[in-house]
Structure formats: structure tokens, C-alpha cells
Image (cartoon, rainbow, N blue to C red):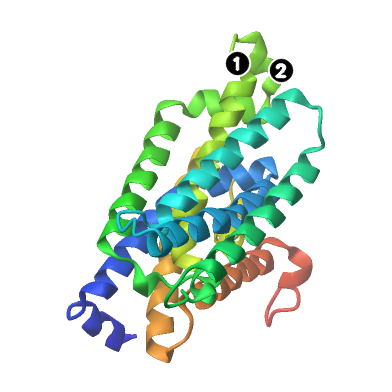
Amino acid sequence: MSDFWTALGQHAFLRMALVAGLAASLASGVIGSIVVTRRITTVAGGLAHAVLGGMGLAYWLQTAHGLAWVHPIHGALVFAVLCALLLGKVQAGGGERMDTVISVLWAVGMALGVIFLFRSPGYKVDLMSYLFGNIMLVDPQALRLLILLDAIVLVVVWLFYHQLVAVCFDPEFARLRGLNVNAWSTLLLVLVALTVVSLVYVVGIVLVIALLSLPAATVGRFTARLGVMMAAAAGLCALVTVAGLGLSYHWDLPTGAVTILVAAACYGCALILHYKPLRRLLPGGD
């Protein structure tokens, strides 16, 4: 990958891609640990797919109505937060099955996104770059917003870590402490939504759930402490993102797909190291 490091010093777009990937990795490791531990990967997947509607709407407003200041990431952010708030309301009310609402948001978001992109005049944006990511195309406007979103996620988790942990793992105890469990659960969903938006440019809508869960699941094989898991998952996610970026540049492959394969390889190694039956298959295994 020496050619990647050489090119990194020559091309600004590579440096922006690297910064975007590292920034998104921090939030992904922190929130991904909660997502994996609380087993709400389906929620994260629904939010990830729903944002295509917002991205398509923003692109349509930009091209069909001349709103040059509107960026697809703005639409993704609005749709993600609104969907998170809706899921929080459904979760608190209990009047509708959560999985049903997630499926509806998933399908409607994707459908709206495709329709808005189809109706946009002029050059049709490459749908594949939204679905599977193209971190090489991160522009300064998107990069600034991505860094801001990641900073918000990290600061909120740092300030309210104990409240979020209490609500995640022992909601009854949290209620006894006087915490508004519904409000804190909704805040957690919003944090997941912000993290999803920050990852869309790195690996795309379809693969967001993989990068959100694989590093955390890998680290979770070796520690049960959430704080340690968050820090280690963020570090592993950063390494995976850099490796995916470098390997994809070296071999001229899609960055998002390569990044996920690297993350999956790390998870596979963790399984081998963690389970004795698999270790016995290795030469010299127990």
C-alpha cells in the first residue's frame, strides 16, 4: 500500500476521504457497541435505508429547483432524525409493532429516494454511490458536517454515558432513579441516526449496518465492559477504514465493499481465537 501513502500526500481528495473515514469510525465504534450489545441492529438498518429518501429529495431540490445550498447529506440528516423520533414515539407508545414500523420506514425511504433521483433533471447521480458508498467523492461541505455530527455524538455520549447505559441495560432501575426512559431511549435512537448519516459516505446505505456492528462485535468477544468495548471498537473501526481505503486505492476496487470485507475478516479471526472448537482446526491448536 506504499502507493496509497505516497498519493495521500499529493491528492487533497484522498486526505479528505481519510479524515471522513476516521471521524466516522469514532462515532461508529461508540454507538456500534451500544447497537450490538442492545441488539438493535435492525433499527440501525432501517434508519440507514430510510435516509435514501432524504438524499433523493435533497438532490431533487438542488437540481430541479435550483437550491444549490441543499446537499444530499442535509436530506439524509433530516430523514434520519425524523425516523428516529418516530421510532422513539412508537417504542414509547407500544401501539404498533416496532419491526413493522422499521420495515415500513425501510421500504418507503428507499422508494422515495429512487423516485426523487429518477425525477431529478440533468445528469442522474450514480445511485450506486449512495447505496454502496464512495468516500473518494466527499466534498468539503459534507466533510465539515460529518465531523460536526461525529463530535455531537461523542460529546453527548461522554456527558450522559451513565444515563444511556442505565436506560439501555436496566430500564426498570433507570425509572426508579427518576430517569425518563422514553426520552433517553429516543435520544439513543437519534444518536444512532446521526452515526448512520456519518457512515453513508464511507460504506454506503446498504453496508452501514455492517461497519456499525462488525468492529463492535469483534471487540465484544474479548471484553464485557462497555466503555472498553467502545474505545477498542472505535480504534478497530479506524484501522479497518484506513485499511479498506488503502487496499481499494491500491487495487482499484470499491472502497465500501473492501472496508466491509476487512471488517468481516477481523470478526472471523476473533471467532477463531475465541472458540476452542475452531482453534483445534488450526495447526498446533489446543
67 sits to left or right of 60: left
| Amino acid at circle 2 | Glu
- Locate the N terminus and report the quarter of the image it occupies: bottom left
Mark 2 or mark 1: whose residue is earlier in sequence: 2
Q: Quadrant of residue 275?
A: bottom right
Query: Residue at 67% of width from left, 28% of height from top?
Result: 89
Residue 157 seen in the figure = yes
Give, as a three-letter code, the residue at label 1.
Answer: Asn
Residue 37, position as x, y percentages in the image: 65, 43
In screen coordinates, is 17 left or right of 262?
left
Q: CA distance from mark 2 to mark 1?
A: 11 Å
Q: Does 1 sit left or right of 273 as displayed?
A: left
51 w.r.t. 15: above or below: above
- The answer to whether one can see residue 28 in this image is no
- At 58% across and 22% down in the image, what residue appears? 183
Q: Position of residue 197 (x, y in %)?
A: 48, 53
Per the image, the residue denoted by label 2 is 172
Q: Residue at x 71, y 17 (%)?
A: 172
Q: 119 or 185, which lies in front? A: 119
Q: Position of residue 5 (x, y in %)?
A: 26, 80
Quarter of the image with the C terminus in it: bottom right
Give the answer, above or below, for where 266 lies relative to 29: below
Q: Which mark is residue 180?
A: 1
